[in-house]
């Protein structure tokens, strides 16, 4: 693995289509997708990739059918209660980004506990975007900066890219080197808009429940052949 690869962000797309193709309820696709997430985290940890971010549930996903949203929330409860245990034992620091006030209080309590329990872990960082939308994140950061100016804590001249980034949900996490989206769709979908300014992209035609460690490693091999110029010659 190239030492320069510090952060990979995933848009896990295709769970519903995977299930529909098999005549299964969409919930079956989400369950299988959660299992794939576990596999990719293990693979990345073994490859010593320092940070992963997964787009698990967007602010727009709240508009889906209530039964599907309820299933996803219950799957999240199960995941927080049991599936993250192994990841914690691997030495991961786990962080959640998104609009927590839109989630049920018991889920938020579990998230807070997991973050507190893993805060000192340093092997790698697992960041999960829940009830997340990048535009809302940027607006939130702008409000925080405005409040700091209004209170006299900082001056307008103190605002720059670094101080602004410090108010984003991802503060302290390096920007993604690589963004992987599955299912063949080629959209950003309101995901880490500030953070991916110079990220490389890989759009896989594979539906997320069929995504494998083998394909993940092949994508990293492809990334390692790219020359990143950051706007320079």
Image (cartoon, rainbow, N blue to C red):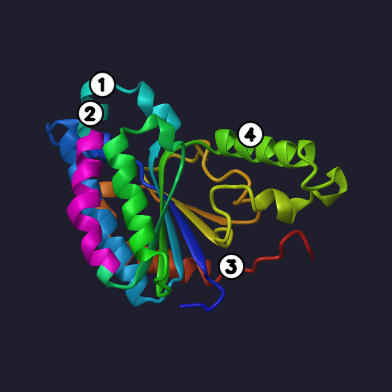
> Residue 79 in magenta?
yes
Badge 4 or badge 2: first in the primary sequence: 2
Q: How many marks?
A: 4
Within 10 Å of disc 4 (Cα), the crowding (few <14, some 14-19, many 20+) is few
Which residues are drawn in magenta? 72-88
Q: Residue at x 43, y 71 (%)?
A: 49
Label 2 neighbourhood size at 10 Å, few (<14), some (14-19), many (20+)? few
Q: Is residue 70 visible?
A: yes
- The residue singled out by tag 2 in the image is 70
Foreground: disc 1 or disc 4? 4
Q: Main secondary structure of the magenta part?
A: helix
Element carrying mark 3: loop
Give neighbour class at mark 1: few <14, some 14-19, many 20+ (Cα, 10 Å): few
Precedes in sequence: disc 3 or disc 4: 4
Quadrant for residue 63, please give it: top left
Quadrant of the drawing holding the C terminus: bottom right
Task: Decide whether residue 203 is among the magenta residues.
Answer: no
Q: Secondary structure at mark 4?
A: helix
Q: Position of residue 137 (x, y in %)?
A: 57, 39
Mark 4 lies on residue: 139
Q: Residue at 57%, 74% (x, y): give it.
A: 4
Q: Which residue is mark 1?
A: 66
Identify the image quadrant of the N terminus.
Answer: bottom left
Mark closest to the chain's N terminus, 1 or 4: 1
Query: Mark 3 = which residue?
Result: 226
The answer to whether any part of residue 21 appears in the image is no
């Amino acid at each position: 693995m190239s030492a320069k690869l510090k952060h990979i962000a995933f848009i896990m797309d295709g769970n519903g289509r995977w299930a529909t193709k098999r005549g299964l309820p969409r919930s079956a696709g989400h369950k299988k997708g959660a299992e794939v997430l576990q596999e990719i985290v293990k693979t990345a940890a073994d490859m010593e990739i320092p940070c992963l971010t997964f787009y698990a549930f967007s602010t727009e996903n709240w508009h889906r059918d209530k039964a599907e949203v309820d299933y996803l929330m219950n799957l999240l409860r199960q995941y927080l209660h049991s599936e993250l245990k192994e990841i914690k034992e691997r030495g991961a620091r786990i962080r959640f980004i998104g609009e927590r006030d839109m989630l049920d209080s018991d889920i938020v309590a579990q998230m807070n506990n997991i973050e507190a329990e893993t805060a000192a872990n340093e092997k790698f960082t697992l960041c999960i975007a829940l009830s997340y939308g990048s535009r809302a994140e940027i607006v939130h950061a702008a409000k925080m900066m405005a409040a700091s100016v209004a209170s006299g804590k900082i001056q307008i001249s103190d605002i720059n890219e670094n101080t602004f980034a410090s108010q984003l949900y991802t503060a302290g996490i390096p920007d993604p080197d690589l963004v992987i989206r599955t299912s063949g769709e080629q959209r950003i979908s309101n995901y880490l808009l500030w953070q991916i300014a110079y990220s490389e992209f890989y759009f896989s035609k594979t539906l997320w429940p069929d995504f494998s460690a083998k394909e993940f490693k092949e994508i990293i091999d492809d990334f390692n052949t790219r020359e990143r110029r950051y706007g320079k010659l």
